[in-house]
Every structure is written in C-alpha cells, then in structure tokens.
Image: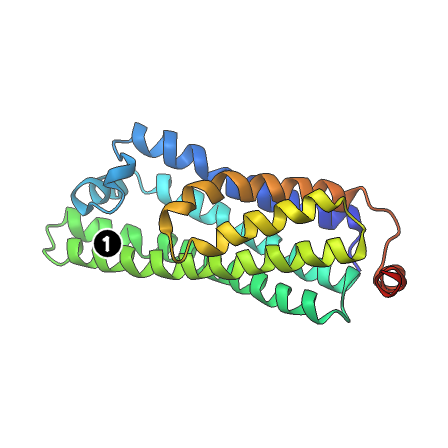
C-alpha cells in the first residue's frame, strides 16, 4: 500500500505537470511563431513541427509520464481510503479514463504529428487535411477526458467532505472546479479556466494527502457511519 506521502507527492506531480502546459502554450509556442489563434492552422503549425519536432514531442513525452503518475495516485487514493466506497470507485473509474485519454492524446502527438509535419515539408497535399482531421478528433477526445476528470474531482471531493478527513473548503472548491472541468466538453472555452484551477486544486489536495499520517479506510468508515 503506498504511503500518504507518496500519494500526495504523485498528486502534486500531476498538478504541476498539467500546469506546465500553460507556459508552453502561452510562451514557448508563440516564441516559435504559433499564436493561440493559429493552433489549428496547418500552414503555421506544420512547418514548426517539421523544423522543431522536440517542441512538441518533448512536452508530449513529459505529459505521458505525468499522467501515468496520476493514474498511480488515483488508484492509490481509492485503495487506501475507499476500496469499499461505491462513490470513490466510480470516481476513480472516471479519473482513470481521464488519465488514459490524455496518455493516448500525447502519444498521438509524439508519434503521429511529426510524421504529418514531415509529409507537409515534403509537399504532400494531404498533410494539411490530415492535420485538420487529427486536430478535430483529438480535441473532441481530449474534452471527453476532461468530462471524466471532472466527475473524478466531484466524486473525490464529495467523499472527502463525507469523511471529514480534509478541510471542507477543499471539497467544495473541488466540486466547483470539477463541474467546470466536466463542462469543458460542452463549452470548450472553459478549458482556459480549468488550466488555471485544476492544477492548483490538485497541488492543494496533494499537500493535504501528504500531510495525512496513518490514515486508512478502516479509520474512515466509522467516521462516515457517525456522520
């Protein structure tokens, strides 16, 4: 069974790893000539992909590792604190779907995007269309992952409030931020809000979990029964 310090550290890694995408999108890509409004423009993106593939493959590889750590954290939280909780089991399922989709999304970026960039540089007429189709598909799948991730945040937050092992304010913020995260699927513009709120919440939750000492599911059940 992983320690609470290990689980907390894994949640912090997940939060910081997701937060690391913000300077990449807002600083690194614009410095390379890709403005936020050009993110789906193949004639802007693909030449940069071909000339500087590491700018895309590096963050993708990093996020694959980060989300693998996140999957470990989600499973560990369920195993340590609520293996008999139906609510936490469902939440964990949603969280694992989120982690899996993000790993797959970044794997596509790592393996497929450089190939399309090379085809574009070679003069392939189909490369632009392939990039457009890939972007549309991965964006939709990524937003579906956010829906599942939002449900995980809401479920974990409700569980934390019920068991009173974390300050209630963390749970209530988790419910609010999770609802916005899940709503990314229906209102993609909310993605900008989630990029700021979700990483912070994960880090705060991770700190709280890491500071928990000697707490297991056996200690939580009586508190739930008494509530």
Q: Is residue 83 left or right of residue 22?
A: right
Q: Quadrant of residue 138?
A: bottom left
- In this view of the protein, can residue 17 be seen by the observer? no
**Residue at the spot 37% in from the left edge and 51% down from the top edge:** 188
Q: Is 117 placed above or below 79 here?
A: above
Q: Position of residue 147 (x, y in %)?
A: 48, 59
Q: Quadrant of the N terminus?
A: bottom right
In terms of secondary structure, where does tag 1 sit?
helix
Residue drawn at point x = 60 percent, y = 53 percent: 70
User: Quick check: 155 left or right of 146?
Assistant: right
Q: Position of residue 3 (x, y in %)?
A: 80, 52
Quarter of the figure with residue 222: bottom right
Q: Nearer the viewer, residue 126 or 219?
A: 219
Q: Is residue 8 visible?
A: yes
Residue at point 22%, 45% (across, down): 46
Quick one: which residue is furthest to the front in this view? 227
Name the quadrant of the C terminus.
bottom right
- The picture places residue 126, in percent across and down from the top left corner, at 13, 59
Along the viewing direction, whichever of 125 and 172 lies nearer the viewer? 172
On the image, the x and y values in percent for residue 211 come to 80, 41
Q: Which residue is mark 1?
A: 116
Asked if residue 43 is positioned above or below residue 84 in the image, the reply reads above
Near-viewer residue (217 or 62): 217
Residue drawn at (72%, 63%), measured in percent from left and top?
78
Say few, some or many: other residues with alpha carbon within 10 Å of mark 1 (under 14 / 14 to 19 / 20 or more).
many
């Amino acid at each position: 069974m992983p320690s609470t310090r290990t689980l907390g550290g894994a949640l912090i890694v997940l939060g910081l790893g997701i937060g690391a995408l913000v300077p990449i999108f807002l600083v690194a890509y614009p410095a390379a000539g890709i403005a936020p409004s050009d993110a789906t423009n193949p004639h802007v993106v693909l030449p940069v992909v071909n000339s500087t593939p590491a700018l895309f493959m590096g963050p993708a590889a990093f996020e694959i590792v980060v989300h693998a750590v996140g999957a470990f954290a989600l499973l560990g939280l369920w195993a340590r604190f609520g293996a008999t909780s139906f609510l936490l089991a469902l939440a964990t399922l949603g969280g694992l779907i989120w982690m899996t989709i993000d790993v797959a999304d970044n794997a596509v970026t790592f393996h497929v995007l450089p190939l399309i960039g090379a085809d574009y540089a070679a003069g392939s007429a189909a490369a632009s269309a392939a990039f457009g189709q890939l972007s549309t598909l991965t964006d939709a799948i990524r937003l579906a992952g956010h829906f599942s991730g939002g449900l995980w945040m809401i479920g974990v937050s409700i569980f934390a409030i019920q068991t009173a092992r974390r300050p209630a304010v963390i749970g209530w913020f988790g419910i609010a931020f999770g609802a916005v995260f899940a709503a990314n699927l229906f209102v993609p513009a909310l993605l900008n809000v989630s990029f700021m709120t979700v990483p912070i919440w994960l880090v705060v939750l991770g700190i709280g979990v890491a500071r928990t000492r000697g707490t297991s599911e056996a200690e939580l059940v009586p508190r739930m029964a008494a509530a």
